[in-house]
């Protein structure tokens, strides 16, 4: 079962599992895109592929969907929880409904899925749950409070579930934590920073992260990091917090925000966005541009200058939203 299968990492996981002939159940909110991915998976060799449109924030709907899957397939061997949404903006600029919405999908959604599948897995002493976390579940960056809090919580949820299920050696819980991945999540983010956003380098292809997720399904490990820079960034955050705090603002602005203006939007946090999603997000890696931005940002940070390309301050919470 792949939750969040209609786009990005989840869609690539579904394709990779299909190619080896697995039975698949695919979940996300928007029915149209799920049907499209189901067709893709059938063509790629899935033993079966079933679209299951569900909003993970609705615990009753998650339970009903899982019950239907069990009655059709008998048991659920593995669940990949890749559903996620993101909001950019200073804490006081992000409307409460959007901030809470990120937590509801990323944290309560993961808990709803876990609560729905673990009792059967425990009864059978068989099954694997893979939660897709993030490097941002181990560090902090500015303008992403809801997402960062949610990903720390996903990591904590994974650890708690690992401890709670130590008495069932056949039940495994893994947390896979990628750095920047080139997916549509940036284009559909809730945005209150006034500028477009992008994955910070080094940017990984969704297929690379999906391969790590599939590997975690086959060879469960408690924690899997995807990204060469993750360990270094984590070390800086933990060991030199004062230097980290000086550098992270300018670096994040240079590397994770673009220059195109963007009107305040709730993105796909409260409801799926229309339009076709894909696996990749189209964020190419322009080495020279990023290196230049990085050099300028580092220079400014170390000289204590303000970033003049930073966004105009967004009026707190009363910002006019562009609800899709
Ligand atoms: N991209 C990155 O740089 C990156 C880095 C680290 C971690 N991650 C994590 O990786 C996971 C996948 O991200 P991605 O980049 O692949 O994002 P994505 O391309 O935007 O895909 C997100 C998927 O989640 C589904 N979804 C969103 N809200 C949902 C809800 N309430 N109920 C059910 N499904 C929902 C979406 O479909 P609908 O909108 O139709 O529901 C879509 O299928 C997320 O947990 C994200 O936090 C991403």
Image: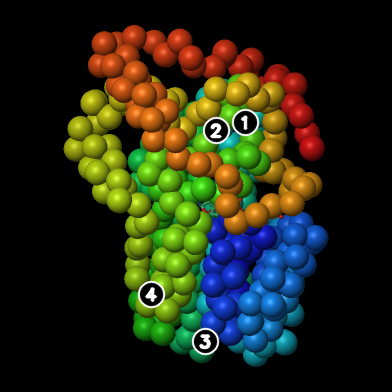
Residue at the (75%, 65%) spot, across then down: 36
Single out the mark in the foreground, 3 or 2: 2
* Label 1 Cα neighbours within 10 Å, binned few <14 / some 14-19 / many ≥20: many
Foreground residue among 324 and 63: 324
> Marks 1 and 4, Cα distance to the nearest angstrom?
35 Å
Mark found first going from the N terminus, 3 or 2:
3
Residue drawn 50% across the image and 34% down it: 144
Q: Which mark is residue 220?
A: 4
Tag nearer the camera, 1 or 3: 1
**Which residue is disc 2 drawn over?**
197
In the rendered structure, are the residues bearing label 3 and label 4 in contact, judged by CB atoms less than 8 Å apart? no
Q: Nearer the viewer, mark 2 or mark 1?
A: 2
Element carrying mark 1: strand
Crowd tier of the residue under label 2, counting other residues whose Cα lies within 10 Å: few below 14, some 14–19, many 20 or above: many
Image quarter hosting the N terminus: bottom right
Q: Position of residue 141 (x, y in %)?
A: 41, 33
First of labels 3, 4 by sequence position: 3
Q: Is residue 5 above or below residue 169?
A: above
Asked whether the beta carbons under mark 2 and mark 4 sit within 8 Å of each other, the answer is: no
What separation in Å lies between label 2 and label 1 (alpha carbons)?
A: 8 Å
Question: Considering the numbered disc 3 on the image, is that residue within a helix, a strand or a loop?
Answer: helix
How far across and how far down the image is residue 200, in percent? Answer: 43, 38
Mark 4 neighbour density, 10 Å: few (under 14) some (14–19) many (20 or more): some
| In this rendering, position of residue 311 left or right of residue 315 | left
């Amino acid at each position: 079962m792949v939750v969040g299968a209609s786009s990005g990492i989840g869609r690539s996981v579904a394709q990779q599992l299909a190619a080896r002939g697995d039975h698949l159940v695919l979940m996300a909110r928007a029915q149209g895109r799920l049907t499209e991915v189901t067709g893709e998976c059938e063509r790629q060799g899935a033993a079966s592929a079933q679209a299951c449109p569900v909003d993970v924030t609705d615990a009753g709907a998650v339970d009903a969907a899982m019950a239907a899957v069990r009655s059709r397939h008998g048991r659920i061997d593995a669940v990949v929880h890749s559903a996620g949404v993101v909001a950019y903006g200073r804490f006081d600029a992000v409307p409460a409904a959007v901030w809470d919405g990120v937590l509801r999908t990323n944290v309560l959604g993961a808990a709803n899925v876990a609560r729905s599948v673990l009792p059967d897995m425990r009864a059978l002493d068989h099954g694997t749950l893979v939660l897709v976390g993030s490097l941002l579940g181990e560090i902090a960056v500015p303008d992403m409070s809801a997402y960062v809090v949610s990903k720390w919580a996903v990591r904590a949820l994974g650890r708690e579930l690992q401890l709670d299920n130590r008495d069932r050696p056949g039940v495994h819980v893994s947390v896979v934590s990628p750095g920047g991945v080139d997916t549509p999540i940036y284009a559909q983010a809730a945005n209150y920073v006034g500028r477009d956003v992008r994955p910070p380098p080094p940017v990984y292809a969704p297929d690379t992260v999906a391969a790590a997720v599939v590997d975690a399904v086959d060879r469960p490990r408690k924690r899997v990091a995807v990204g060469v820079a993750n360990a270094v960034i984590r070390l800086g955050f933990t060991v030199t917090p004062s230097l980290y705090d000086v550098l992270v603002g300018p670096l994040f602005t240079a590397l994770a925000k673009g220059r195109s203006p963007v009107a305040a939007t709730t993105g796909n946090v409260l409801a799926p966005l229309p339009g076709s999603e894909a696996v990749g997000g189209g964020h190419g890696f322009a080495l020279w541009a990023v290196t230049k931005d990085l050099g300028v940002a580092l220079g400014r940070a170390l000289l204590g200058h303000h970033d003049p390309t930073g966004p105009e301050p967004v009026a707190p919470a009363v910002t006019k939203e562009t609800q899709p």
